[in-house]
Image (tube, grey):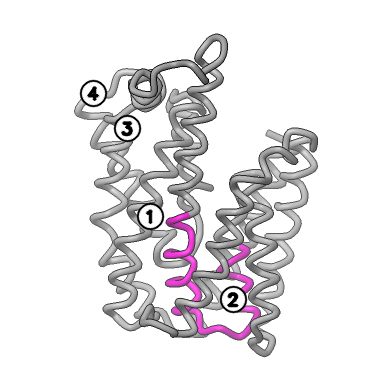
Amino acid sequence: MEITVGLFLTLLVFAFICEYIDASLGMGYGTILAPVLILMGFSLSLAVPAVLISQAFGGLVASIFHHQLKNVSFKANSKDLKLVMIISGFGIIATILAATIAVNIPKTILKTYIGILVFVMGIIILRNKPFTFSWKKMIGVGILSAFNKGMSGGGFGPVVTGGQVLSGNDHRSAVGVTTLAEAPICICGFFAYIIARTIKEIPGSVIHMPFSEFIKKMLSPDMIQWELILALLIGSVIVAPLAAFTTKSIKKEKAFLFIGIFITILGAWTLVKTWWL
């Protein structure tokens, strides 16, 4: 699909809006943007890597501003940095390993499970009765969110952010942790996706293929639409300061309300898309 100047600017605005939502509430970038790109006419094979790599860079930049504005602390040995390591560690492992399991499970079952899980989590958050924080609970959140991300590519942000809030973590810290934790997962997912697709597109065995030719094919326009990635990257990166400031400005009571409502809507929308659209 050819990207004109007008379409480039439109994509930039969409990425700006989606990253603003994601980096200020801790969820929503890929959930919103990927379906929008497909509706605009982009193929899934081009939309997925573009969303992943732009989300990674947008999240990294937003994390810097979250730290500078003291929404979260990523200093050495801080609780927030330890949470990032736990959540991203499980996420990376799941992203690489869970794909072999996912091919044997109907997509409808996976999407239904995630929709129900996210919807129920949103309802619990709206009750505004968080539990006491514990590392065991956060390890459980990491495993659960990693399972969702690795199996279906979705349901990560709502579970990680919502799980932290329910476990008693401060809402600002929860958003900052989720924003940074998802970045390495998205980078691994990006490379895993384009490598797997390149191997699939090359006829015969790739073992004896010159490495330079493999890299050339992997980075070719057939595998990656660079104009699409550039538009999404610019949009997602420039909004980072505003998103971090929004997180800092939201009071705890409003944060519970916004995050609870948004998670509930995402869960309901996942179920609607799975069964009725």
Where does the N terminus fall, quadrant-wise?
A: top left
Give the amino acid type for the residue marked by disc 1 in the picture.
Glu
The percent position of residue 97, horizontal first and vertical second, equals 66, 46
Of the pair 149 and 78, the residue shown nearer to us: 78
Q: Which badge, 3 or 4, comes first in the chain's sequence?
A: 4
Query: Mark 3, mark 4: which one is toward the viewer?
Result: 3
Q: Where is 119 relative to 123, above or below?
A: above
Residue assigned mark 2:
164
Q: Amino acid at mark 4?
A: Thr
Q: CA distance from mark 3 to mark 1?
A: 15 Å
Q: What residue did someone put label 1 on?
A: 19
**264, above or below 247, in the image:** above
Q: Is residue 79 left or right of residue 160?
A: left
Q: Is residue 244 magenta?
A: no
Nearer mark to the viewer, of 3 and 1: 3
Give the quarter of the image for residue 125: bottom right
Please tell me whether residue 179 belongs to the stretch shown in magenta: yes
**Closer mark to the observer between disc 1 and disc 2:** 2
Q: CA distance from mark 3 to mark 2?
A: 33 Å
